[in-house]
Structures are given as C-alpha cells and as structure tokens.
Amino acid sequence: MQAAISIQHLVKSYNGFKAVDDISFDVSAGDFVGFLGPNGAGKTTTINAITGLNNFQSGSAKIFGMDVVKDYRQTRPLIGLCPQEFNFDPFLSIEGLLIYQAGYFGVVKKIAADRTRALLQRFGLFEKRKQDFRKLSGGMKRRLLLCRALIHDPQILILDEPTAGADIELKYDIWKYLTELNTQGKTIFLTTHNMEEAERLSKTIIIIHKGKILHHSDKESLVQNKTLESKYLELTREGAPP
C-alpha cells in the first residue's frame, strides 16, 4: 500500500543549525501517528516541510506518492493542518473564515456552507458563527482550528498539539472526535507533549530528538521496549532524616 506520507532524508537548516537532520519515515494510509519529542526537537519544522510552509535543503516529502514541492497543487488539498497558533483572519466572522478557507481548495460555496454548519454545530460554535474569533474563549479557538483543518475534507489531518491549554472536557471531546475520524479512514499525524494523549490515540509512535529520529514502531512495541524504561536519581540532603 502506498504511504500517505513519505519522508526521505529530509534536511532543514536555519543559519547552519540543522533543525531536521536527515530523517526518513513513512506513514501508512489510515494510521494514527504520535510524533513525539521535546521542544526544539524538529516536530513543527517537519510538519511545515510536509505542508509547504517552509522550504528544506535536501531530501523529499511525498503525499500519496506525489512530491510536496513539484506537485504542490495536488498535495495541498489532501492535507488539513491544525497548528498551535490562533492564526485566523480578524476581518471575517467565524462562519466566513471557514467558507473562505474551503474556497482555497476549490470547494463550492454551497458545499462549504453545509460543511461549515455541520462542523460548527458539532463543536458547539454555531451560535457564535457571526462573531469574529477574538471574542471566543481559548477552548473555542481550539475547536475552530480543528474545524478549519477539516473544512475541505482532507485525507490527512496534521495536528500540532491540538489540545494544548484545553480543559478536560474539551480534550476528551477532541480525542473522541479524532478517534471517530481515524476509524472512518482519515490518516492522522499528531504532535503532542501529552503522553496520555499519545497512548490513547496513537497506533504508531515516532520519536524525534535534536532533529533525528530515535524510535519508530507501533505503540505496543514501544511500551514493551526495555531500553526506553524510565530511570531516576534520588537525591537527599546530608543529615536529613530518611
């Protein structure tokens, strides 16, 4: 089966610093991948290379066999990106920005309006559809990011810490919805610092550190990997009671 995402020998540098250092991995269609690593590991840089938000020096990124650089017109509509930042157009209503976003991908207005209504209702935002995003709470903005990523019905959903700062109720609701989407066949590529989130949702785990891939396997293999067991050092003050 052709990979939904194929990264081969990808290198991205900033002023001589290799943020992504010759990484390679494939993501199967229909998989749910947890892409893990500390801040500065190269997660967002990798996502930006896949989605065309930044250039890279060497290697390749392909979506269903199509190159993201040479075949960008074909690959962009296949991906829905949910970033960390609230980067919405402040001059459009919530409803308007989703319809406008769908237009980028050739979705006709009638279909875009129907999808907008369905997504806003699903995430409890329909009553606020005429407002601009600045009047939404942080949790509502998180929901709106997900709506925007899904408005053109992409085959691949890329999520960059989608529940960061979300309350428990919203987090569980997003988890439930992502699981439903994956069950329906969407390929999901998730970055997160939440280990519970990765464990609950992911089928495959990829760990990146200092721009290099350290681990790539199914979740069960990672859990059973003895080399990744946690270790700790206990320090006590001299003369302190045990």
Image (tube, grey):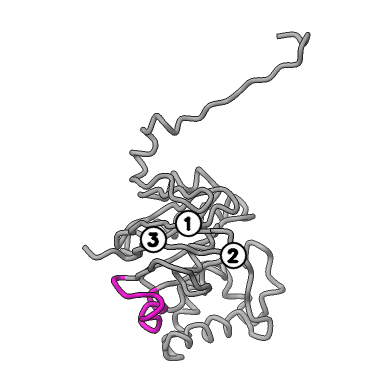
Mark on residue 79? none
Kindly report the distance in space between the C-alpha atoms of the residues bearing marks 1 and 3. Answer: 8 Å
Return the mark for residue 14: 2
Can you give x and y, in whole percent of width and height, for residue 132 in the image? 67, 79
The circle on residue 21 is 1
Which of 71 and 18 lies nearest the eye of the viewer? 18
* Amino acid type of the residue tagged 1 in the rendering: Asp
20 relative to 71, above or below: above
Find residue 55 and report its horizontal and vertical position in percent: 50, 73
Residue at 57% in and 25% down: 232
Q: Secondary structure at mark 2?
A: strand
Q: Would residue 171 appear left or right of 22 to someone viewing this image?
A: right
- Mark 1 vs 3: CB contact within 8 A: no
Pointer 2 with pointer 1, Cβ within 8 A: no
Q: Are marks 3 and 2 in contact (CB under 8 Å)?
A: no
Between the residue at mark 3 and the residue at mark 2, the CA separation in whole angstroms equals: 17 Å
Image quarter hosting the C terminus: top right
- Tell me which amino acid carries mark 2: Tyr
In this figure, what is the number of numbered marks?
A: 3
Q: Amino acid at mark 3?
A: His
Q: Which residues are magenta?
A: 64-78
- Is 125 placed left or right of 75 in the picture? right
Badge 3: few (under 14), some or many (20 or more) residues near its Cα, within 10 Å? some
- Separation (CA) of disc 2 from disc 1: 11 Å
Q: Residue at x 39, y 66 (%)?
A: 59
Q: Earlier in the sequence, mark 1 or mark 3?
A: 3
x and y percentages locating residue 115 in the rendered image:
45, 79
Residue annotated with mark 3: 9
Identify the mark nearer the N-term, 3 or 2. Answer: 3
